[in-house]
Image (tube, coloured by chain):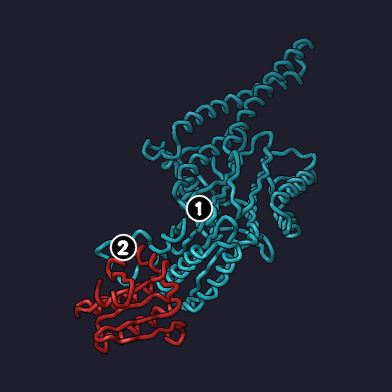
Amino acid sequence: MSGDLSTMTHEVERRDDVLIVTPHGRIAELEAHHLERELLSLIEQGSVKLVMNLSDVSFITSTALGALMVAHKRVKPKQGYVRIVRPQPLVRQILEITKLVKLFGLYHSVDAAIAGR
Amino acid sequence: MAEKRRTSKRAPASAGTAAGSPREVCALQKSLAKANLAIGQLREEIEELRSRAREGENARSTVAELSRELQSRTLRMEQQLAVARQFQRLFMPPALPRNPRVRLAVKYQPSPRVGGDLYDIFDMGNSSLGIFAADASGYGLTATLVVAVAKMALDTFRQGEYSPKRIMEQVNRQVLQNTLENQFLTAFLAVVDLETMRMKYVNAAHPCPVIYGKGRFEELDTEGLCCGMFDDPKYEERETQLRPGDKLLLCTRGLVEMINTAGEAYDRKRLHALLQANSELEMSALVEKLADEFNRHMAGAEQLEDLTLVGLEVAARKSTEERIVIPSEPMQLNRVESLILARLESLSYGERAVFGVRLAIEEAVINAIKHGNRMDKAKRVIITYSVDERECAISVEDEGQGFDPSSVPDPTADENLELTHGRGLVLIRAYMDDVKFNKKGNRITMRKIAPWLVE
């Protein structure tokens, strides 16, 4: 699956040693593969603290959750984290059903996520 | 029959192997044997009475007496046959199963002397339907006995068994063990998967089972000997795909072997010609028409055999049910989703329901592509869906090996939370109201009840 097929766009912003990743729209199969590659490449370049701002994401699937999990497992041994900010209600519900809120933690703002509270 | 049955195999079945011949069969066997004997004796006596009457040895008063005696004995014999007829009726299903995907039709015209036909149509669970037709050797109470044993064996051994070959082997064994040497039946059994419309069948020397329809005409012959004569009847199971509009017709030898007053049988040639000329006629009308033609053909001749016609017709696909077939490429999902979601939106299912159904489609189709077809683009994913004011039903089938859904670890358990995959099913179950798999595990069927019918 090539990244060209994905319709997802996203921005990455750096604040000190934290990366804030803001995807837009749907993260289904192809977009999830695209996102996974992006996250792994950022981690590869030395970032281990990732804040996912999901406020503009309308839809995710289990493959997207898998991508976040791959990133989580990669940064955890390096004292990093993957934190999630402001998911829309339907996306939040998916995180609750799969119990991943426990693992990632949900934050009401980017600042709160960086502060870890 | 070329092969002679070895009498050593005729030892009475031990209690342990008598699963298909419970006590009722034994009781029935005894009473039927007794009744048969009585009929035999009656026949002889009647013959004797007749000849004595013919010879005119006695005075007219004696003749009248004998005639009265003859009448009353004939009446008793008729009563015995009526009992056999009642038994035979008892073995036929009281009502046909109902399923929107097929239409069933039966025409049963018993012979006055009881021809030993048996048919059965039964819901087997797991979306499967069984269709059975058989014709016992002999007639009268003898035939009824064979039918009884076959019926008990069929009822017993079809429980939880979907292979017509294995069921027929058990019927063969039971009839072999529990009837006399020259008693057997010809039989045909089909098992139809109502979801996929694939039909498995086995033919134990039964005449003329046929599938016909638009551009299709096939006789359903398989290897295998008649039922209840041989230790190893060598049954062969075949499989075929039924399409919308296809029709299956089973008959018994009453249709194709009886000779009329002109010495002609209503043979398979006539049968085939009639079916081909009436391939569009719906099944219930077809069996009536066929019986009419047969009865006209046989006009004036004695009906020595039962006439049994059993028909199944695959319903044309419901107008609301649609089918999409895609190659194993995730890119194809957009097309599938936009078709199904457009239906949901046109019926105002609302944002939450549309979200849930979209997620379920994504997860099911991606599972089918990745885990079912293992990304093999030559393999297809078949999506069937229907949306109406009551519910949205979707099934997704792949061409892979299938899997056991209960073998997937629960990804929401603490120790599994970090798994990178395996959450699709949890989401499907959370967002759809009813989720089922076929036995093979390569087809998921899921329903979403319309939001206005919930709460």
Q: Do the CB atoms of the residues marked 2 and 1 lie less than 8 Å apart?
A: no
Chain assignment, label 1: B
Give the crowd class for mark 1: few <14, some 14-19, many >=20 residues within 10 Å.
Answer: few
Is residue B292 positioned above or below B363 on the image? above
Q: Chain of mark 2?
A: B
Mark 2 or mark 1: whose residue is earlier in sequence: 2
Q: Position of residue B355 (x, y in %)?
A: 48, 67
Describe the element under mark 1 as helix, strand or loop. loop
Q: Amino acid at mark 1?
A: Val
Quickly name the residue at label 2: B412
Q: Which residue is mark 1?
A: B454
Q: CA distance from mark 2 to mark 1?
A: 26 Å
- Residue B429 position in % (x across, y down): 42, 60
Chain A display color: red
> Which residue type does callout 2 highlight?
Thr
Q: Residue at x 25, y 81 (%)?
A: A49
The chain in cyan: B
